[in-house]
Amino acid sequence: MNRNARPAFLFAVALLAAFAALAAQPACARQDVQRDAFAAYIAGDYDAAIGGLRRLAGAPDTDARVIRTLVAALAETGRYEEAEAAARSGMERPALAADLAVALGDVLLERGRRDEAETEYRRALAPGAHDAHTARLRLAQIRWERGDREAALDEFDRFIDIYNDSESLSPRDLMAVADAVRRLGVRDPQLFHDAVKALDEAIKGDRGIVDGAPAAAEARLRLGELFLEKYNSTEAQSLFREVLATNPRHPVALLGMARAKNFDGSDEALTLVGQSLEVNPHLVAARVFSAQLMLDLERFADARAQIDRALEVNPASLDALSTAAAEAWLRGDERGFEALRDRILGHSPGYAALYEQVAEMAVRQRRYAGAVDLAAEAVRIDSSAWSAYGVLGLNQLRTGRVEDARRNLDISFAGDPFNVWIKNTLDLLDTFGQYRTLRTPRFELVLHESEADLIGPRLAELAEEAYDSLARRYGVEPPTPVRVEVFPRAADFSVRTVGLAGFGALGVSFGSVLAINSPAALDRGQFNWGSTFWHELAHAVTLAASRHRVPRWLTEGLSVLEERRARPGWGDDLTPEFVAAYENGDLLPVSSLNNGFVRPKFPMQIPLSYYQASLVAEMIEETRGFDAIRRMLAGYRDGQSEAEVFRAVLGEAPEALDRTFDTWLKRRIGARIEAVNVQQQAGEPLSAPLTVVLEAGEPPAGDFFRQMGKAKALLAEGKNEEARPYLERARTLFPEYVGPENAYLRLAEVHEAAGRLREAADQLAELTRRSDRNYDANLELARLLEQLGDTRGAAAALERATFISPYEPALFERLAQLHTRNSDWAAVVRDRRALLATKPADLADAHYQLALAWFNAGDAAAARSAVLRSLEIAPNFERAQELLLRIRSREPEPGAEGSR
Amino acid sequence: MSRLRVPLSPALALAAGLALASPYRAAPQDARTHLIIVAGIGGEPRYVQAFYEMGARLAEVAVSRWGIRPGDVTLLAEQPAMDAERIDGRSTKEAIDAAIRSVSGRAGPADQVFLTLIGHGSYQGSEGRFSLPGPDLTGAELSVMLLQLGGRRVIVANTSSASGDFVKPLAAPNRIVITATKSGMERNEARFGRWFIEAFAGESADADKDGAVSLLEAFDFARTEVARAYEQEKKLLTEHAVLDDNGDGQGSADPGADKVDGRLAGATFLGKGAALAGGPPPGASPELRALYAQKQEIEKQIAALRAARDTMDTGRYEQQLEKLLVDLALKNQEIRRLEGGR
């Protein structure tokens, strides 16, 4: 028995019943029903449309438009079997067979029945058939899919003649032309413009409700997809929006919008794809996209469920199979991946999108080396897979293969000049000539020429220290050399990281390739480049320990934790905002903490998630020992799922760990919850008491902000000593608070005004122990410590300042003088070199001071070279002349003369 | 299209280097500098105070460091009562005119006059103005006042916002005009003045380490520090200082001793700066004069060598440079010994 016979039979019975009622109505009533049904379909009232169209479809004189629209309505709602039955029933009338063949073929293709679809498309080639051009296009597409690329391209090429030789083409014909030239774009990217033109004409030529299934909506969807394919999300969204304005339930438009939102990084994608699947639960593309979103969130089981549902509908879907292959690859299921790969390539030899898709997913899971291998395989099986060349090049760049990357990016851009990521990246690579590479035993530090001497020496020291420290703790050495690129422009860092300007991160780790902003990229006080570097190197270590399989939340949490361990004040600390988020239920459970990084629901969720993740890591270390962290990383390395790792190492299921963490956190921050007093702040910013005039009277003793507010009011009246107890109480209530108007700064001012310099310095010391980005506090601390005779402490404070903003000549001058007093000549040389790099006005003196430092450090050759530079600028510079003569006569240096 | 570069032979370069020698001479060492400082109207107490303090600082430095006679310094400010001892009068247009007239009456023909305007500027209609108590001062009006000084060397530094419009009307031979902005359209509060004054107060502006700060060095220092300040604050530079000293009325943003503007400014100093940067002191012995002549000859050779640097092998350049620098250092030692055993 034919597998379609039963639905077709049932459908015929239904039609007969429906028509029996309709037949009794006059012709004008039937026209009304048809108009209403078409209108219902266009508006997305699918049930009404299907009801009306069914009543019409059984009539012996029903035209193909009615049945095509019925088939479309059924297919759009995922009722494929009924759609097939409707098409077949209509085709029983010989006059309609050719006209409905494409509609049937499309339904069959949606189910993966390629051979049967092909038969129908051939039937549609009959002379005078309604959709012959579409049928020809579909046949060429099937050829392409089967790997007969050249023949398919020849077929596509014929559509150019079809367009040029025809005086008028129907909207559907124009869509076929557009699809064909879009495919031809692989040979000539400019043809994409012709595809846009044909689709524009299709939209303009649409007759709307007269034709039932309107071509304009479909053309708009195709155009939207084309724009999205060419990286123009704005135009794409505008087109999808136009379709949704008429039919808010159009599942393909909803899916298109979801893709476009995902392209923009918006978390609306999940909601939109959900809406699409509500209308059509069998929409394979939506299931596949949903699976990809799940994979982004590292929810492998959920992804697998979506893929299974897609494959139930269409077991041959290359997209679904490729996503399944990606899922297998990400889980480390090599056999599974290979089986799927063979199945896909058996269906479609040369299907490079398989490898490209897996490579893209690998990138999102930070598996850059794997992505390189996969993308290389993509371009091996299809030398015209331009986007795959792009994926290859970008990931070669991420793994430090700059020249290979440039070559492949050039190929990609030549084939697809619309790709703004590739263009931006190539533009950035063109600037690499302005960068200098410094080498240490385990690092290649790539710094802009203007900053190489400012940041390079300190970064070199820090990098080696960090490597030793982290490798020792984790028992893993990331592959060397570790390449660190430091960008003085935020836009360049952003392009290096994501291909576009506007990426808000401070640094990124691709494994053994790190990229960070230099402090020049952001306003002073926005970040500490030292802690940022340490954070990124910690990623390199945890990625290496897990073979790049550590979940995002854990690697971020560990990196923040390692920052805190590296230096006092580094890494995020508790903030009132975090406490408020906890109180308001805005923190995510540990089991879904990845969402806070990948799809944050509000901007603050990202920093909150960083800190929260670090607390989870801290809790694990505190309660199970650091070895538990190492074993977790090993578990991920060995391909265990998160739930498996949690159970094996922590002895808890994810949901149980959520509860454990909540209890731990409440204990950890309980006192601060009371101090912040979130409930009383309802409707006001947390720090409102700092900015408004307070009511008279004594503030609640346990209310941090009100204690601070009272102190501020007293300080404004010059009542320093009266303010002091409030400041001290506030400091005790929330010692982690180092934001604006913090108690440490104000107490330091109060103490200094009263001549208590030591106490003032103590406050600033505590502040700088808690905050890694307060430049002015470090400078002030250094000043006070110098007054107190503590030159080493002063130098240490200024050292900290160089990690916040290393650009002021005066900073290095002070440092060099302090190091001179401590006879630390290596440090003096380093700081004199940095001072020179700030391009001070007095260059002759800067060179002279450097020469003197070299001389004192025992390097006469370097001293000679530096003093010549000084005298070259100022030939009569007396002190430099004396130094030159002394160097030549090799007189011993009588003593430190660094300070003027 | 790239332009063909013809390599310069060392000999030619040497000649070219010599040709770059400044045609301007420093003022005679016994010539005096007359300093007129005008602190304009502040509008707000903090500006009144700030302008006065800047003016007072320049006056103090001029006397204490550069040896200008206190009687040769005139300080005008908005509120003379702020410091009746140091402020010579209210900074009105009439007072400025009177101060210039006074200087013209007592200055010798070789003396130089340095007029500094500190305060707010504006651009109204098609004319830049310096804001004063009472009527403001335009470039054209100041130009007429300066006629009283005849052919003496005059330096005008207008450090106010929108001051660029003063360059054209004030330009004249033997005159250095410095403005904080390149046009009247740059109207944001200018920071140039603070650094310009600091150039004469501190050590850092003396780029060639001859012990004196030329007008060109002060300009370069201020320009550099202004740019640095804006960069550190991540703000767009809204003031572009210019200097004109060739009298063409076109200010240069990047003047230099070998450029269109900058030669006169490079040879002009405040007070005793000319003596520090110049040749032998008056009444020097023939032996000392000979040493100075030899020193100047070495300086010329160094200048020529530097000009030829790009055409030479680095090693050879360094070798020759070091030899000349050692010769110069030794010559300076001899001079110092003769001058007083330093």
Image (cartoon, grey):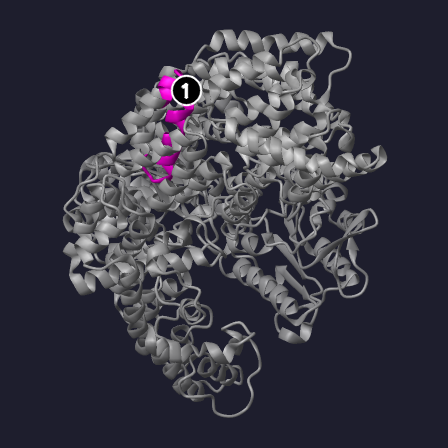
* Whether residue B67 is situated above or below residue B151 in the rendered picture: below
Picture quarter containing residue B153? Answer: top right
* Whether residue B327 is situated above or below residue A152 in the rendered picture: below
Where residue B77 sits: x, y (%)? 68, 66
Residue at position x 34%, y 20% in the image: A377
**Bounds of the magenta segment:** A344-367
Is residue A356 in the magenta section?
A: yes
Residue occupying the far bottom of the picture: A697
Q: Locate the C terminus of chain A by quadrant.
A: bottom left
Is residue A214 in the magenta section?
A: no
Q: Is A789 on the left-hand or right-hand side of B301?
A: left
Residue A481 in view here: yes
* Callout 1: chain: A
Q: How many marks?
A: 1
- In the picture of the structure, the residue carrying the numbered disc 1 is A351
Disc 1 marks a residue whose amino acid type is: Tyr
* Whether residue A5 is situated above or below residue B144 in the rendered picture: above
* Whether residue A271 is situated above or below residue A10 in the rendered picture: below
The answer to which of A70 and A707 lies nearer the viewer is A70
